[in-house]
Amino acid sequence: MTKPSVAVVAGSQLADYHFGEDHPFGPYRHQAFLDGMDRLGLSSQVEWLEPVQCDIQSLQSFHKNEFVEMVRQRSDEGTGFLDSGDTPARKGIFEAASTVVGSVLEMIDKIMDKQFRRGFVPIAGLHHGYRDHCSGFCVFNDCAIAIEHLRRQHGLQKILYVDIDAHHGDGVFYNYDSDSNLFMVDFHEDGHFLYPGTGDVDETGCGPAKGTMLNFPMPMQANDADFSRLWPEAEAFIKLVKPEFIILQCGADAMKGDPITHLEFSQKSYQLAAERLSHIADEVCDGRMIALGGGGYNKENISLAWPVVVRAML
């Protein structure tokens, strides 16, 4: 029997990245994904990997030392917040957040070693994290640390980051907006209506990086038809880039019925993005692509959106 081409990370240590039963980013998200995988009959078609915790050095490749230390301290104490009030300092959150990062880096290593063509990490894609602070339920920015890891450990330069989460990926965008080798495509609900209020269409990168980033702010109630109408522009840009590695952040909160956002995508948009990116990855970078679950606060939507991404990557 041939080994699966796609690997998926799952396990209790990864599921432990949450902020309690009453928080939007609750503990149910991991199981919702597993249920969806079973429902589509995909569980036997992928290789399942255990979560792993990263070391301090990996966190410090992007985040400031003082910030990492502050998270560790507050995690040990288990009281207060890690930001201005959205992200509780739950006991053990340091270890859980480090496991998100470690699982992403381990998956990247296995893809780069040609053990798998592609990988999926459901509890990941924490795209609001900044170098010196956390925001929007995102403690450590695994997307940004992944970019650093691909460059430092694997010598890649030209990396493509695609984000279809309902929220703008500000923690990636503003930390790399003058980096001419990070290419970014971000579909999100217009910042006039939704946190973090950024990602205007005229923001395309700064200085030497001008033109390396595309923002697609979408109106409330934007749907699959709107997404598919805009996708060809994104794809034309991606094909010109010819990336060496593709990162997809596929937050399920752009689906209709999410309790904290206002977009109305169905599975179709997730399938379109993941299918086309997989096809491009096969054409230009040996299939190398990782997808990260991102946001999503409706259990049913998670069980619909993420497994469709995995299926498309297969």
Image (tube, helix red, strand yellow):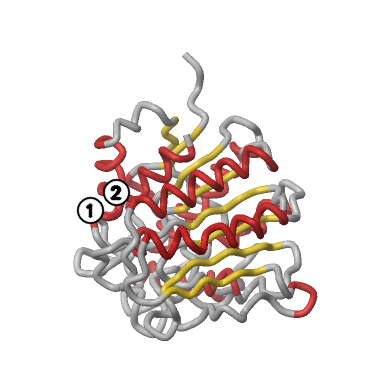
Looking at the picture, which amino acid does disc 1 mark? Glu
Q: Position of residue 313 (x, y in %)?
A: 48, 39
Q: Residue at x 42, y 47 (%)?
A: 271
Q: Is residue 57 visible?
A: yes
Q: Quadrant of residue 38?
A: top left
Q: Tell which of 22 and 70 is nearer to you.
A: 22
Label pair 2/1, CB-CB below 8 angstroms:
yes
What element does badge 2 sit on?
helix
Q: Residue at x 40, y 50 (%)?
A: 122
Count the numbered circles shown. Answer: 2
Q: Tell which of 101 and 267 is nearer to you.
A: 267
Q: Position of residue 284 (x, y in %)?
A: 70, 42
Q: Position of residue 191 (x, y in %)?
A: 44, 81
What element does badge 1 sit on?
helix
Q: CA distance from mark 2 to mark 1?
A: 6 Å
Residue 152 vertical position relative to residue 21 in the rendered view, above or below: above
**183 left or right of 276 in image:** right
Looking at the picture, which amino acid does disc 2 mark? Leu
Q: Residue furthest top?
A: 1
Residue corresponding to mark 1: 300
Residue corresponding to mark 2: 304
Residue 219 vertical position relative to residue 90 in the rendered view, above or below: below
Identify the disc placed on residue 175: none
Q: Residue furthest left?
A: 22
**205 left or right of 133 in image:** right
Q: Tell which of 275 and 224 is nearer to you.
A: 224
Q: Check disc 1: other Cα within 10 Å, few if <14, some if 14-19, many if 20+.
A: some
**174 left or right of 33 in image:** right
